[in-house]
Amino acid sequence: MPNRPLKAENPDKRQEAPKPSLSPEALVEMAVKVIATHKGVEPVILQVRGLCGFADYFLICSGTSRRHVVALAQHLEEEMARAGVKPLGVEGLQEGHWVLLDYNDVVVHVFLQPFREFYDLEGLWAEAEKVSFETLSTKAVPSET
């Protein structure tokens, strides 16, 4: 058997996120613009920084049908990819009830309205600050990397 160098393994075996070239504020601003352009219903931005260790922002919105939910998620993924940002994971595209797109610092939840009401993430994260788009626009600057 030939000698091969041992690979250093990530101990928790999770995929490491590539560092995005955009700040979390710029990412969520881009995401909300895409959602608004494609007629996403009632987008809400929650700042969860300090409340959880896995994200800075949640963007929560709804679609009017399963097809609309899937289309919103696909448009978002395409626009973010054009900006050089790829999700760590996407869940729920097949069902179209609740699609989650994980962009590391920004997690986007696209719901079919009855599922949004049932899971009530806004209520679950009630202590999170709701961020207005205008406030966010003043913070959105590229990261220094």
Image: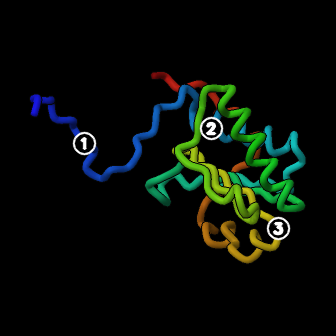
Query: Which numbered mark, 2 or 1, is in the foreground of this view?
Result: 1
Q: Label 2 crowding class (10 Å Cα cut-off): few <14, some 14-19, many 20+? A: many
Q: Residue at x 61, y 67 (%)?
A: 125
Q: Position of residue 35 (x, y in %)?
A: 80, 45
Q: Residue at x 67, y 72 (%)?
A: 123
The earlier-in-sequence mark between 2 and 1 is 1
Give the number of marks: 3
Mark 2 vs 3: CB contact within 8 A: no
The earlier-in-sequence mark between 2 and 3 is 2
Q: Residue at x 70, y 50 (%)?
A: 131
What's the residue type where badge 1 is placed? Answer: Glu
The earlier-in-sequence mark between 3 and 1 is 1
Q: Residue at x 28, y 44 (%)?
A: 10
Q: Position of residue 48 (x, y in %)?
A: 56, 55
The front one of 51 and 138 is 51
Q: Label 1 crowding class (10 Å Cα cut-off): few <14, some 14-19, many 20+? A: few
Query: Which numbered mark, 3 or 1, is in the foreground of this view?
Result: 1
- Can the viewer see residue 74? yes
| Res. 135 image quadrant | top right
Which mark identifies residue 9?
1
According to the picture, the residue beneath numbered tag 3 turns out to be 113
Q: Position of residue 130 (x, y in %)?
A: 69, 56
What's the residue type where badge 3 is placed? Answer: Gln
Task: Give the colouring mode of the picture.
Answer: rainbow
